[in-house]
Amino acid sequence: MVRSLASSAAAAATPPVLVIGAGIFGLSVAYAARRAGARVAVIEAGTVPGCGASGGVVGALTPHTPVRWSPFTAFHFRALLDLAGHIREIEQVSGGLGTGYMQTGRWTPLTTQHRLDAARADAAAAAVVWGNAASLTVLDTLPEAAAGWLAPEAAAYGVQTDTVSARVNPRAYVLSLAAALQNSGVAISCGVGAARVFPDGSVVTTEGTTLRGQHIVIAGGSGAWDMLRPLAPLSWTLDGTGGVKGQAALLALDFPPPPTLIYADGLYVIPHDSGVVGGSGSGSTTVGNGDANGSCSGLVAVGSTSEKEWALPSDTDDKLDQLVARAQTVVPNLSNARIIRRWAGVRPKPPRAHPVAGPVPGTSSVWVAGGGFKIGFGIAHAIADGLVAQMLPDLIEAPLSNPLPKTFSPEVAFAATKEPRPSKTQTDTAIT
């Protein structure tokens, strides 16, 4: 575990940590390092924290399938279980800023016999590897609470449910985390980007100044890979890195949102509180007056597209309109919902299916944390704890209960030879 926030005198004597990027990964690393007692500073190229992919509207927190269980999926599952406690701490340290977090569970409508067979395999695997921590079940018919929220034809073969899935308001979480950092003495300098990172731990900013720190953490979202290229050993391949554009929308309802999040073959429908409207940065467009407070009874986020090619990263288009139309077919209660916000952004795509977190070989002080793609908000806190445990081992009291898998290390993630895909339902990392 990581120590509680150190006193200012103790923090002043510890090595400085400079984090590049104020998205969910960068802020989480900064919080874990400060919580351990290190002096920390954060720079962000955008105008506010969460300007990039972390400023979206969806906020789905769901586990991987338990069928192909591996150290990575086990890490992700444990991170989801631990998130509620982490969120409570952040909200307290921030001074009471809510994050919109709620463990809602999930409905996955089953449209074919093949999907029903896969859901039953998931349920059997979850009973083994999830243990008593959570459950995954298959219902032959729609639950009563799903009336109006799932079209019968969209769930012709039943519904898969789980008890671990949750939701968070991405924008609210980022703002709460930024406030917690500032209340803990961490400066977040927005409008200051990193033009070049050097192996010796120096950073030339977009303003032309040079910053130095004993530990530099690159957490710049999809731009992190370009920062890494000049530092990458010859044995690395950064092919396949970059970003995937996503578009999403926030809809206002005249009645309460569904009691659980819905996932239907790549489509997410996420219930949110009406108290906080998500979405920020250049990719967020308010529709109409965008007033969700007092003008609706609930909010629902619909997302997301996955686009490998695009003209403008922050523009929304007919792909989002088609996604919303599909959501209204699957979820009849959305048929008269009003779109109050449209959002688009580029999410960081890792070289493989795994995030990247660890030291950059050949440098004395450069680290990287990125590639969360669609699961970043569910694992950022655990990634941060694992990275800080490696970066500042003298400040850590005890071994972590959820250490980083070896496949997250840059040496493995960027290696030219890929490791084989895990076989089905390995139980050596089962939750007990």
Image (cartoon, rainbow, N blue to C red):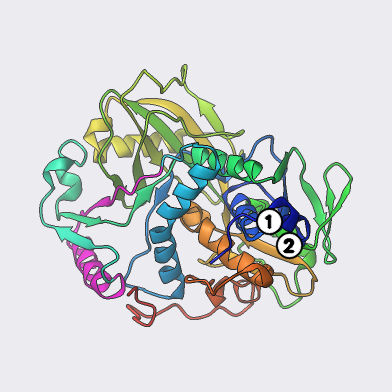
- Residues shaded magenta: 101-130
State the image coordinates of residue 280 (x, y, percent, origin top left): 56, 34
Question: Residue 162 versus residue 92: which sits nearer the camera?
Answer: 92
Residue at position x 38%, y 39% from top?
Answer: 302
Label 2 to label 1: alpha-carbon separation: 6 Å
Question: Residue 28 versus residue 315: which sits nearer the camera?
Answer: 28
Residue contact between numbered discs 2 and 1, judged by CB atoms under 8 Å:
yes
Residue 255 showing in the rendered view: yes
122 inside magenta stretch: yes
Question: Residue 242 versus residue 77: which sits nearer the camera?
Answer: 77
Helix, strand or loop at mark 2: helix
In the figure, residue 187 lies in which quadrant?
top right
State the image coordinates of residue 268 (x, y, percent, origin top left): 36, 46
The type of residue carrying mark 1 is: Ala
Residue 310 showing in the rendered view: no
Work out whether 125 lies above or below 115: below
Residue 331 disc label: none
Work out whether 159 lies above or below 328: below
Q: Name the residue under label 2.
A: 228
Residue at position x 85%, y 66% from top?
Answer: 200
State the image coordinates of residue 9 (x, y, percent, origin top left): 75, 54
Q: In this view, does 269 lie to the left or right of 285?
A: left
The quadrant the C terminus occupies is bottom left
Q: Mark 1 points at which residue?
A: 224
Question: Residue 216 versus residue 155: which sits nearer the camera?
Answer: 216
- The residue carrying pointer 1 sits among few (fewer than 14), some (14 to 19) or many (20 or more) residues within 10 Å by Cα, namely many
92 inside magenta stretch: no
Helix, strand or loop at mark 1: helix
- The residue carrying pointer 2 sits among few (fewer than 14), some (14 to 19) or many (20 or more) residues within 10 Å by Cα, namely some
